[in-house]
Every structure is written in structure tokens, then in C-alpha cells.
Image (cartoon, coloured by chain):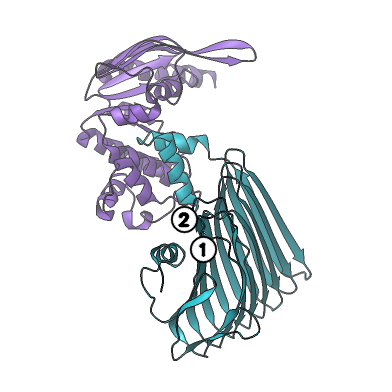
Chain colours: A cyan, B purple
């Protein structure tokens, strides 16, 4: 079963203190560590490649699936393919996430390829947290690929969080939306040390009345580097909005590349990007409440990334 | 008591030294409700910022409760009991009104306690407590929240830099009431920078700052009639010209 380090990682990435209720699949050091299925949610191991299929029946409501991954051995490299087949008229919460504890000298890498097939009128909330720890010289690397295919009037709300300890990440998220579908993305990212993070979004609004809102808030500290690319393609009457808001500190480097691609006169697409340091007035205000400069900075960043 | 001794603050502009505060001496006694007024550009806001440590003195000394605070940081002054309501409150993305009030008190105060501070500045607490302190709030709302943070700290010396600046006349009417209430209930020393007659009218003492110096300092009953007299005289002269 899970050891203490693995349990700690689970707490960080999935807020799990014990086995979750409902369906779950916990993967530890490349192996299945625990699984539970329910009447409505089935989890099946893939036979052709590493990974699982998560099959959610039509009409499944108020249920959750947890599929966290933890790596606590140094030097593991894996690519895992997880496919979510979500029926019609569902309302479910999916919690993924990966925690790496690398105390060794070899790189640990988990590349999760997640595909979501969201049925008509279904509502999904997807939460994905990435976390790294350990003082070894081996790097902690996460390269997630997320593909989302949304049927008519479906609603997907994605929360992607990477706050600490991941040395290198290259995230690619692609989505295709049918009529009336909505996709909301909230990404929160903090990099420090020598970390590098790239996040690329491409959302295609194919169905009439489809809409998306991609919001990224990030903080880049020390010598870290962040690249944020958001492309929204409007093929029909649709609404798209992308926003990148970054705080830059120390010697960090932040690149924001918004791209709007309208192929229809009724595609309403907007992007906003802002990069800047913490405002001196903000620090002064909090210091005038009795906080030290370091405490003030922590509060400002904490609020910004909430 | 706050003692300001021979304060000077200079800035360099276009290779020239400009004196904003000029060898200023001033004592402010404990428990007084003091209003600083004077012409624009006379150095009022600068003086307030020097007291909080937001700007650094060129020369002079500042003694607070017998202790030399000249070299103290903003944080140290705040911890020794000085608070400041800024003329232009800042925005914080993600920080909620409740968070800011908790930071101000330095305690994890309950929602009820936080609401009391908001009520004191005339805000319907439950509408605001969970709002972020960002640009979705109006200038008047931000100003009140700013004042609430100072009330929440409850320090022995509170400075309000032009609370009336940048708010509309309707908000202003309410704000006057807020200060009338502060006048009645607050225990420490209150120092307000203001041009408003109604605020001047509730002062114990009025200080007039002009050209970086204290031009007048005395009880309200003494200073206010003089100020109004001057204004009346100007108005009369102007009306004759038109």
C-alpha cells in the first residue's frame, strides 16, 4: 500500500487524506495502487498501452472520480494515457493530479495524456494539481497533454494548478466545442529557481453559441521562465476570451502569446495580457498595516494565485 | 505625543533641489482630533507620508511617544501604533475585503467583527465582505474600505490623507458622518488632511501648512474663522470683478 511520502503527495495533489469516496484509481510509481468503481463509473485498464479508460454512464450526477498519480522513486519515466468517456446529462467532478517526490539524482517524469469525450448536456468540473518536492539533483518533470471534445451544450470547467516544485513542464491543452458548449479554464502557476513552464492552449469554437474563457494567473520568481500561449479559433457565432496576468519577480522571464483566429464575422474574440511586477503601493499599504515586506509580498502573491 | 523637529524634505527636479518641507517644527498632542489644511502643493500629503515613513526625510527628527522613530521603516512605525489611510487606495487582485481587514487587525477576526468595521464606514457589510479589493469597486467604496482598515487597526495615531478626494458628492455626505462618528468614538490621536469645512469644523486643532512650513497652528475656534474670513474676502473680491 501507500507509504508516508506517497500519502503526503496525495494530500498535496488531490486534497486526499484517506481513500476518497466514489470512484478512484491511484497510480504509484508506475503501478496501480488502488482502485474503486461505482455503479455509474467504471475504470478499466488499457491493454495496448499504459493507462485507463474511465467510463461514466449517462445521467450520472453528483459523483466524483479521483485519479491521482504519485512518483516517489527517483528515475521513473512514464507516459500514461487516460481516456474519459462521459455520457449525456452527467454532472461529475474529476480530480487528477500528479505529485513527484524526487530525492535521488535521476530525473522523474510523468507525462499524462488525458482525453475527454463529453456527452451532450453534461457538466464536468476537472481539477488538476501538480506538485513536486525532494532535494535530490534529479529533475521533476511533468508534461501533460489534455484533449477535450465537447458535444452540444456541455460545460467543462477546468482548474489547473502548479504552485511548487516542478522543474520543467510543458502543458498542451486542446479543445473542440460543439453547439452551445462552454469551456472555462483557470490556470494558476508559480515557478521559482531555474524552473521552466510552458502552457499552450488551443480552443476551437466550432458550434454556434459555443464559448470559452481561458484565464491564466502566474507568478515567476528567481531565474524561472514561463511561456503562455493561448489560441482561440472562432469558426462560427461564438464568444472567446483569453486572459494572461503575470507577476514577474527577480530575474524571471515571462512570455505571453495570445492568438485570436476568427473565421466568421460573428465570432467575438478578446484577449488580454498583462505582465508586471508587484506594485510598490501594494507593498506599502500592507506594510502600513504592520506586515514586513516579505510578508506583504507573500500575501499579494497568495491572493493573486487564489 | 508626536514631535516633528526641524523636518526637511527635498527632491531633485531637473537638476534643481526643490524643498517640499522646509525646517518644519510641529507637536501633536495625544488624543487630539487634528485637521491639516492649506493650499495645494504646500506639502500636506508629503508631511503625512513622512510621518508614516512612506517617504524618507532629508533631515530632521521624529519622536513618537518619546522614542526616536526617524530611522524606522513603515512596518516598524505601523507596529508602534501609526496607521495611514491613503488618498488613493490600491487594488489587490484576489485579496478580499475580509482578508484585508484581517491583515489590518493582525488577527483572524470573525466575519461578524469585520462587518462591524464596514458598518462604521457606511458599507452594507454582507455585500462587501467577500468582494475582492479590485477595480470592480468604485472610488468611494475603496475609500471607505481604506478607512475601515485604519479603524480596524485601532492604533493610537491614525492619519487620513484627504479622505474626500476623488469621491462624488453623495458619498461625501456619508463620509462626513463617518468622520463625525470617528470623532465621537475613537480613542487615539486622529490627523486628517482635508480642505472640507465640515471636517475642519469638527477639529480640536487646525494646522495650516503652506510652502512646506506651519503657517498657523491653534484651536479650531481660533484658526477656522481666520481661514473662512480669508475665503470670504476672496469670494467678495471675485464677485466684484464679475
> Residue farthest to the front?
A105
The answer to which of marks 2 and 1 sits earlier in the sequence is 1
- Give the letter of the chain under mark 2: A
Q: Nearer the viewer, residue B236 or B79?
A: B79
Residue B223 in view, yes or no: yes
Q: Residues within 10 Å of mark 1 (few under 14, many from 20)?
A: some
Badge number at residue A73 = 1
What is the spatial separation of the Cα atoms under label 2 and label 1, in whole angstroms? 31 Å
Where is residue A178? Give x, y as percent: 67, 80
**Residue at the (64%, 12%) spot, across then down:** B15
Where is residue A50? Give x, y as percent: 61, 78
Residue B194 in view, yes or no: no
Which numbered disc, 2 or 1, marks the residue closer to the eye? Answer: 1
Figure quadrant of residue A78: bottom right
Q: Nearer the viewer, residue A161 or A239?
A: A161
Quadrant in the picture for the N terminus of chain A:
bottom left
Q: Do the residues labelled 2 and 1 touch (CB within 8 Å)?
A: no
Q: Name the residue under label 2.
A: A306
Left or right position of A267 against A126: right
Where is residue B206? Give x, y as percent: 31, 20
Amino acid at each position: 500500500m501507500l507509504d508516508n511520502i506517497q500519502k503526503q503527495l496525495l494530500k498535496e495533489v488531490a486534497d486526499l487524506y484517506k481513500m476518497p469516496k466514489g470512484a478512484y484509481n491511484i497510480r504509484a510509481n508506475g503501478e496501480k495502487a488502488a482502485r474503486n468503481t461505482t455503479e455509474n463509473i467504471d475504470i478499466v485498464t488499457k491493454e495496448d498501452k499504459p493507462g485507463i479508460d474511465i467510463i461514466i454512464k449517462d445521467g450520472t450526477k453528483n459523483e466524483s472520480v479521483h485519479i491521482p498519480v504519485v512518483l516517489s522513486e527517483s528515475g521513473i519515466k512514464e507516459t500514461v494515457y487516460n481516456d474519459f468517456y462521459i455520457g449525456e446529462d452527467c454532472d461529475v467532478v474529476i480530480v487528477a493530479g500528479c505529485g513527484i517526490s524526487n530525492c535521488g539524482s535521476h530525473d522523474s517524469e510523468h507525462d499524462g495524456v488525458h482525453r475527454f469525450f463529453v456527452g451532450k448536456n453534461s457538466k464536468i468540473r476537472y481539477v488538476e494539481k501538480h506538485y513536486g518536492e525532494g532535494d535530490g539533483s534529479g529533475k521533476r518533470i511533468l508534461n501533460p497533454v489534455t484533449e477535450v471534445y465537447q458535444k452540444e451544450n456541455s460545460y467543462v470547467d477546468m482548474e489547473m494548478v502548479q504552485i511548487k516544485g516542478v522543474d520543467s513542464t510543458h502543458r498542451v491543452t486542446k479543445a473542440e466545442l460543439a453547439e452551445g458548449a462552454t469551456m472555462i479554464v483557470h490556470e494558476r502557476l508559480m515557478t521559482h529557481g531555474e524552473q521552466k513552464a510552458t502552457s499552450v492552449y488551443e480552443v476551437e469554437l466550432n458550434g454556434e453559441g459555443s464559448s470559452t474563457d481561458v484565464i491564466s494567473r502566474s507568478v515567476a520568481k528567481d531565474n524561472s521562465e514561463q511561456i503562455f500561449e493561448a489560441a482561440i479559433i472562432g469558426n462560427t457565432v461564438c464568444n472567446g476570451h483569453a486572459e494572461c496576468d503575470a507577476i514577474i519577480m527577480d530575474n524571471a522571464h515571462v512570455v505571453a502569446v495570445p492568438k485570436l483566429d476568427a473565421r466568421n464575422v460573428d465570432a467575438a474574440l478578446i484577449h488580454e495580457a498583462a505582465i508586471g511586477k508587484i506594485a510598490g503601493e501594494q507593498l506599502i499599504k500592507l506594510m502600513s498595516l504592520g506586515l514586513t515586506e516579505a510578508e506583504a509580498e507573500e500575501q499579494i502573491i497568495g491572493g493573486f494565485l487564489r | 505625543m508626536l514631535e516633528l523637529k526641524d523636518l526637511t524634505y527635498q527632491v531633485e527636479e531637473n537638476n534643481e533641489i526643490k524643498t517640499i518641507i522646509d525646517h518644519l517644527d510641529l507637536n501633536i498632542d495625544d488624543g487630539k482630533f487634528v485637521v491639516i489644511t492649506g493650499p495645494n502643493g504646500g506639502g500636506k500629503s508629503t508631511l503625512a507620508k513622512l510621518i508614516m515613513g512612506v517617504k524618507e526625510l532629508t533631515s530632521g527628527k521624529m519622536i513618537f511617544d518619546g522614542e526616536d522613530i526617524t530611522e524606522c521603516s513603515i512596518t516598524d512605525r505601523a507596529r508602534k501604533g501609526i496607521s495611514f489611510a491613503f488618498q488613493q487606495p490600491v487594488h489587490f487582485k484576489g485579496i478580499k475585503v475580509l482578508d484585508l481587514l484581517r491583515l489590518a487587525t493582525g488577527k483572524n477576526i470573525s466575519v461578524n467583527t469585520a462587518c462591524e468595521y464596514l458598518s462604521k464606514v457606511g458599507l452594507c457589510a454582507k455585500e462587501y465582505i467577500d468582494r475582492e479589493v479590485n477595480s470592480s469597486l468604485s472610488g468611494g467604496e475603496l475609500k471607505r474600505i481604506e478607512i475601515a482598515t485604519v479603524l480596524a487597526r485601532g492604533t493610537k495615531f491614525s492619519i487620513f490623507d484627504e479622505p474626500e478626494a476623488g469621491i462624488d458628492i453623495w458619498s461625501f455626505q456619508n463620509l462626513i458622518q463617518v468622520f463625525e462618528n470617528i470623532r465621537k468614538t475613537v480613542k487615539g490621536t486622529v490627523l486628517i488632511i482635508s480642505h472640507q469645512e465640515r471636517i475642519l469644523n469638527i477639529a480640536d486643532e487646525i494646522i495650516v501648512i503652506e510652502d512646506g512650513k506651519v503657517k498657523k497652528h491653534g484651536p479650531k475656534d481660533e484658526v477656522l474663522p481666520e481661514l473662512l474670513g480669508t475665503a470670504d474676502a476672496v469670494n467678495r473680491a471675485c464677485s466684484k470683478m464679475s
